[in-house]
Image (cartoon, rainbow, N blue to C red):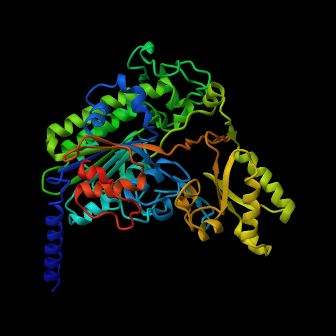
Amino acid sequence: MRRSTTLLISLFLTGIFSATAQMPYGSEKPKVVIGLLIENMRPDYIQRYWNKFESGGFKKLYSNGAVCSNVNLTQHNQNYASGTATLFTGVSPSTHGIIGKSWYDRLRRKEVESTQDDYYFTVGADTKFGNASPKKLLTNTITDNLKIFSGGKARVYSAAMNRESAVFSAGHAADGAYWLDPESGRMVSSSFYINNFPDWVRDFNSENYPERFSYQNWVTMYPEPHYTESMPDLYVHEKGYFDEFNTFPHTIGRYTKRAENLTPLKTTPYANEIIKNFGIQLMEKEAVGQDEFTDFITLVFSSMDYANNSFGPPSLEMQDSYLYLDKYIAEVINYAENKFGKQNVIFFLTANTSASYPVGYLKEEFNLPVDYFSPESAFALLASFLNVSYGQENWIEHYTDHQVYLNHDLIKKNKIDLNEIRETASNFLNQYEAVQLSMTASQLENGSSTDGMLSLLYNSYSKNRSGDFLYILREGWQPSYKFKKVNYTDQSHIPMVFYGAGVKPQIIREKYNAVDFAPTLSELLQIPQPDKSQGRPISPLMNGN
């Protein structure tokens, strides 16, 4: 009976497959999808550096692909964990649950990482950096749907510097997700994905790329006068590494020694070279593109990583990073097209975060009304205000990523109405010049908004994970902590380009959102959209108009 049922389901799915294969916008399904996902990428980098790019990388994608020029990633807390989850699920953080790289867990009374999962262990190194899974991601990804629709026969992989980007682009059902362990310097994975570490990855790690690169200086690809699109190297508003080293050459060994791990390497072009080399080896060694089922590889490139705010979009370091990245992307495209055939590959280029200009640059060069906002000072004053209003207690339990968690046990013990103290605290914060808007959890739970500034908060509020009130800073303002470094951006505009099999070159200027990415790619791959998708396919891409 079970075999008969399975056969009927198989025939039914085959019927769907046959029907979708005849859809007018596509020809044969691609054998391979290759994602080029970039962290902290502003779309205007392409325009700014265009004349310095070579022909086979960014220029090839933008000249021969479908360029969506008006795409926004609208969420309260812009970070690569939430951004990747939004792109690959087609839903906002309020639904997929990844409200940040980490958030405060009231039951455990501590911050929890979005991918941390100690039930699983590191594969590929004797550290805990692979103790991870996508289990906190509450919805399916496009890669999950591809695996389900193919009956598990599609092969799905990802590789990144940052664990969150690798995990959330791979999804729950992937064959492999890999990321750099900054302690061991190896590309590692989790036992959630892999039981037996592949020999080819072991061989790749034996090349010791991170350690070798950490002993090299980062020098510019061209002489400094070549970088006419950027500010001079010695620029007063560049904080630099450790708020000290802001000029070339950058001595990576000095930085890694000071950090006591390889994390600074992630901010350099060498990190992108490692991902490029790893991606090419993956395509060479794994059984990708060898049958009728579409396989999916996502390579995530870092754009200055956490040093982005230390240098910023106008810096010579940023331009040099993109000139190197242009070469690496060209190598990936060239290798994939030669191996699988141009007619068999679809590439996409997008970003999981954008990037803001440094406060000093906007303030001093252009006289914009921006500055730094100190959460530590603001919440010290808020704590004093609550003490005067409700009595001497530790009313603020935790604050992080523009949200505040109040102490519910104390509030209940003192018989204070939770919504009242929420509104009192939120209204206090609304008085700050830096704060555009603060809203309470109760307001977000009982209201609704799809447009404008409020959508950032509504799209990102998750009942069991978010704080008691969330706030947004005014445009251009940035948080500044005494003892914590943050990679902050308030920019939502991201690039999105599709290139390859069945995609007609065009510029699509209509406004779209990051949640439209997953349904669009699903249509191109002729598979069902993620079940809870809030987006819509980018229709001009389907009909070539």
Residue 122 shows in this picture:
no
Is 531 on the left or on the right of 480, as rendered?
A: left
The quadrant where residue 277 appears: top left
Residues 461 and 134: in front is: 461
Q: Residue at x 13, y 77 (%)?
A: 7
Q: Residue at x 30, y 31 (%)?
A: 59
Looking at this view, name the residue that lies furthest to the front. 545
Looking at this view, name the residue that lies furthest to the bottom. 1
Percent position of residue 368, x then y: 65, 33
Q: Is residue 265 above or below residue 91?
A: above
Q: Is residue 489 above or below residue 422?
A: above
Is 334 on the left or on the right of 384, as rendered?
A: left
Residues 197 and 309: in front is: 309
Percent position of residue 135, x then y: 42, 63
Residue 449 shows in this picture:
yes
Percent position of residue 379, x then y: 74, 51
Image quarter where the N terminus lies is bottom left
Percent position of residue 142, x then y: 32, 59
Q: Residue at x 63, y 63 (%)?
A: 109
Q: Residue at x 61, y 42 (%)?
A: 475
Is 394 on the left or on the right of 345, as rendered?
A: right
Residues 24 and 131: in front is: 24
Is 312 on the left or on the right of 9, as rendered?
A: right
Residues 480 and 114: in front is: 480
Question: How many marks can you see?
Answer: 0
